[in-house]
Image: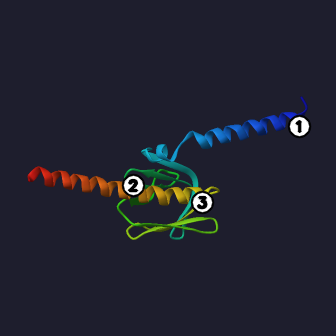
Amino acid sequence: PSAAEGLRAAEAKVARLETKLSRAFSAEELVRLQSLSFRDLVVTVGTVQHPAASLELTEQGLALVGREGRALLGVSCDQEVQVVASVSGFTLSSRDAGRCLVESKYASVVGRLVKLWMAYKKEKRRLKAERFSLGRGEGRA
C-alpha cells in the first residue's frame, strides 16, 4: 500500500475510534463518577501564573493543584461558583475562594464540565441533607 493509502486507513481508524469513544459513556455514567481530573492547565491566581497545574473535581467540590502538589484554590460544592468563558480559557470565581483564570487548549469543555459538575454535586448534597432531615423528623414522631 502507498503512503497515502496508509494515511487514509489510519485516519479512518482514528475516526472510528473517536466515534466509539464518544458513544461509550452516557451522561448518566458521567454523573456517577466520583472524580474527574484535568492536567496540563495554566492557572493564574492573582498575578501569579502556575503552569502544569491540574483541576480535580470530586464529590466535595473542586481543587486546583500546582505542579508540586500544592493547593492553589479549593471550592466546596456548597459554595456558589461562577464559570465565565474568556478568550484563552475560563474564569472561575467564588465568594470564599476568590478568582482565578484557567487556561487550556480544551478550556471550553473543561469549563462547561466544571459548571455542571459543581451545580449537580451541590444539588445532590442538598437532596441528601433534605432526606436526612425528613428521616430524622419521622423517627421522632
Viewer-closest of 64 and 9: 9
Q: CA distance from mark 2 to mark 1?
A: 48 Å
Outermost residue toward the top?
Answer: 1
In the picture, measured across the screen, residue 104 lies left or right of residue 93, that is right
N-terminal-most mark, 3 or 2: 3
Q: Position of residue 91 (x, y in %)?
A: 53, 67
Outermost residue toward the right?
Answer: 2
Label 2 Cα crowd, 10 Å radius (few <14 / some 14-19 / many 20+): many
Q: Which residue lies under the disc numbered 1? A: 4
Tell me if residue 110 comes above or below residue 20 in the rendering: below
In the picture, measured across the screen, residue 45 lies left or right of residue 133, that is right
N-terminal-most mark, 2 or 1: 1
Q: Which mark is residue 120?
A: none
Q: Do labels 1 and 3 touch, CB within 8 Å?
A: no
Q: CA distance from mark 3 to mark 2?
A: 20 Å
- Per the image, label 1 sits on a secondary structure element best described as helix
Label 1 Cα crowd, 10 Å radius (few <14 / some 14-19 / many 20+): few
Q: CA distance from mark 1 to mark 3?
A: 34 Å
Identify residue type, mark 1: Ala
Q: Position of residue 36 (x, y in %)?
A: 48, 47
- Residue 124 image-quadrant placement: bottom left
Viewer-closest of 96 and 85: 85
Q: Which residue lies under the disc numbered 3? A: 108
Label 3 Cα crowd, 10 Å radius (few <14 / some 14-19 / many 20+): some
In the picture, measured across the screen, residue 17 lies left or right of residue 79, that is right
- Per the image, label 3 sits on a secondary structure element best described as helix
- Per the image, label 2 sits on a secondary structure element best described as helix
Q: Which mark is residue 121?
A: 2
Q: Position of residue 100 (x, y in %)?
A: 51, 67
N-terminal-most mark, 1 or 3: 1
Identify residue type, mark 3: Ser
